[in-house]
Image (cartoon, rainbow, N blue to C red):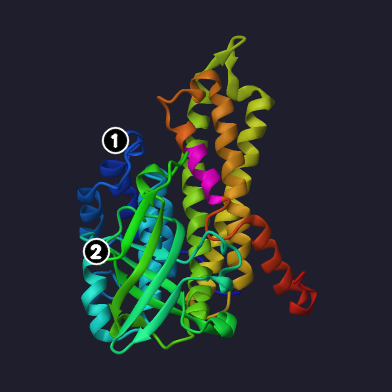
Amino acid sequence: MSGFGFSEEHRMFQHMVQDFARRELAPGAKERSKRTSLPPELLKRTGELGLLAPNLPSKYGGQGGDFISLGIAVEEIAKADFNLPLAIVTLHGAALALESSTEDMREEWLPPLARGEQVTCCCLTEPEAGSDAANIKTRAIKEGDFYVLSGEKTSITLGMQADTAYVFAKTDPASGPRGVTCFWVPLNLPGIGRTAFPDMGWLPLGRASIVMDGVRIPARYRVGQEGEGFYKVMQTFDNFRVLLGLISLGASQASLEEAISYAKQRTAFGRPIAKFEGISFKIAEAATEIEAARLLCYRALWLGDQGISHIKESAMCKWFCPQVAVRAVHNALLIHGHIGYSADFALEQRLRDVIGMEMADGTAEIMKIIISREVMGREFLPY
């Protein structure tokens, strides 16, 4: 591998995002984490800076950056505000889906998303089809110039706040994964109902169940050809999983830095607790694991920028990073002692949030199956 690393442009972009996160996101982040939606003014401000879609072409409201730029944006923002980067990741998925659509569709929907004027969500998971995405039950039946969608999607991030959704449905139930098609669905259409989940974390993201009962959408809102949806979502996952890993690491890096600062100032038995190996070893382990996981993520994004398959690497990121983050944030909380357990500090909120990353867009077990398949071959899959 040659040329792997941040360019000077990447460094400049990173410093810009860090400055924005420090000045405009960190203040009030703890209070925002208790809300049940992302503040519209915050989304618009992030969009003004081109940070909601840094890798989109400028004509759609992006900065024309690469996947590494996208990774930098979500990691640095996550250090200040865990929830906001999930809107960036979801928008990235929408942009990938709309690549298979028409230019008119892209011009209609991408700019308002990139400006933060609208929010979208990905509707794949169903009550009986999470990891087994090919067996979704939602149907899309063609009737003249329309499709009629019926079914339930569940555990939908941003489902309560989203204005639109990219929905995966079966147009040919007998064809398995080849019968899945993607549709762009405005969520103000008749026949759509939403129910919020009372979650322990991710509160501003408004995870929800979305029910579609005979929802009619124009045939032009089909994304790509019939039967391409499953392969489109699999392609989306390659970057989704890396970005979710970087969000986890952003939260854990912020927690580690707080733990280091506290350990230097807090004294016990006449000296700073940072001098005790029970503390310093936790810090050393977290610093090493976060750095290793971060390098894995950026290498995966670099491979994507080179047009090289990174299925294995993205699954590694999705399995390893949340595991590292949960351990790092938990230990940072323990280093703070009883005050770290207080709701007055961000540590308890980050711990609840990073636990959610262990399940989002594929469990650790599914990731290990993907890694095993890529390492040993499909003939050794357990199914």
Instruction: Tell me where residue 166 sits by quadrant.
Output: bottom left
Sequence-first tag of 1 and 2: 1
- 376 vs 75: above or below: below
Does the segment drawn in magenta span residue 353? yes
Is 237 placed left or right of 35 in the picture?
right
Is 187 placed left or right of 126 in the picture?
left
Residue at x 44%, y 63% (from the top left corner): 152
Identify the element where label 2 is drawn. loop
Q: Residues within 10 Å of mark 1 (few under 14, many from 20)?
A: few
Q: Nearer the viewer, residue 307 or 241?
A: 241
Q: What secondary structure predominates along the stretch shown in magenta?
A: helix
Instruction: Tell me where residue 271 sits by quadrant.
Output: top right
Magenta segment: 350-357
Residue at x 45%, y 62% (from the top left corner): 153
* Distance in Å between CA atoms under marks 1 and 2: 31 Å
List the residue tagged with mark 2.
Answer: 188
- 182 vs 52: above or below: below
Q: Nearer the viewer, residue 306 or 328?
A: 328
Q: Where is residue 61 drawn, in percent x and y?
A: 23, 70
Does the segment drawn in magenta span residue 41? no
Q: Where is residue 320 drawn, in percent x and y?
A: 63, 54
Answer yes or no: is residue 56 visible. no
Q: Nearer the viewer, mark 1 or mark 2?
A: 2
List the residue tagged with mark 1.
Answer: 28
Q: The C terminus lies in which quarter of the figure?
A: bottom right
